[in-house]
Image (spheres, rainbow, N blue to C red):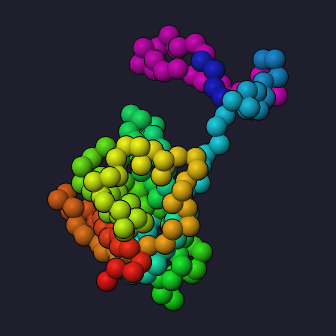
Amino acid sequence: MFIKCHKTKNRKHEQEKRIKMSWDNTPNKISPWDNFEEVDPKQARNNYIPAGVQGIVKVVELKVIYSKKNNNRPIFVASLAVEDCGEDHEKGLVWDWVAKADEKPYQMNIKSLVCAINPDSDPRSFGREVMDTLTGADNPAKGATLRIRTESIKTSRGNDFTKVHFFAVDAD
């Protein structure tokens, strides 16, 4: 913590001098834990799905979060646990697949995921009500299995991006 002191009279050196405060001389014995009950915990994230993966995953959770750093933009998150993705990926390892829920190309990928979970349903039937249910508290897709294949692509800006393709487990 720092408190402001006087400015020097010499214009050449017009800087604020600061005196470091110690916790011992703070007014009213301030504690770092004052109002701690109002602090939200930081949510730990799973790793993202790496490129070059092929195999079977199980849905752990589907949810929508709102990104504080992007003006509360809705973000779709699918947490997927490895079932069988080769020797390099331990069974039970959980990855997150993250997509901007308000952009058409990402919505198309989200719909591919939902179609892979529900291969016998008409994709046109997956509207707001279905998505609200799938990403709601009950999380009815939990435990569903699907097949994924990932690849690394370059974006138009030249950045690396992992593209995830979703398939029903029995689809070839």
Q: In the displayed orientation, state which residue is furthest to the bottom.
A: 87
Q: Residue at x 45, y 44 (%)?
A: 132
Q: Position of residue 112 (x, y in %)?
A: 32, 63
| The stretch drawn in magenta includes residue 14 | yes
Q: Quadrant of residue 102?
A: top left
Q: Is residue 27 above or below residue 49?
A: above
Q: Position of residue 68 (x, y in %)?
A: 46, 37
Q: Quadrant of residue 113?
A: bottom left
- Along the horizontal axis of the image, is 9 left or right of 130? right
Q: Nearer the viewer, residue 58 or 121?
A: 121
Q: Residue at x 51, y 83 (%)?
A: 84
Res. 46 in view: no
Q: Position of residue 140 (x, y in %)?
A: 54, 56
- Along the horizontal axis of the image, is 73 left or right of 25? left
| The stretch drawn in magenta includes residue 58 | no
Q: Position of residue 159 (x, y in %)?
A: 26, 62
Q: Residue at x 65, y 42 (%)?
A: 41
- Quarter of the figure with the N terminus: top right
Q: Residue at x 54, y 79 (%)?
A: 83
Magenta residue span: 5-26
Q: Is residue 133 above or below residue 155?
A: above
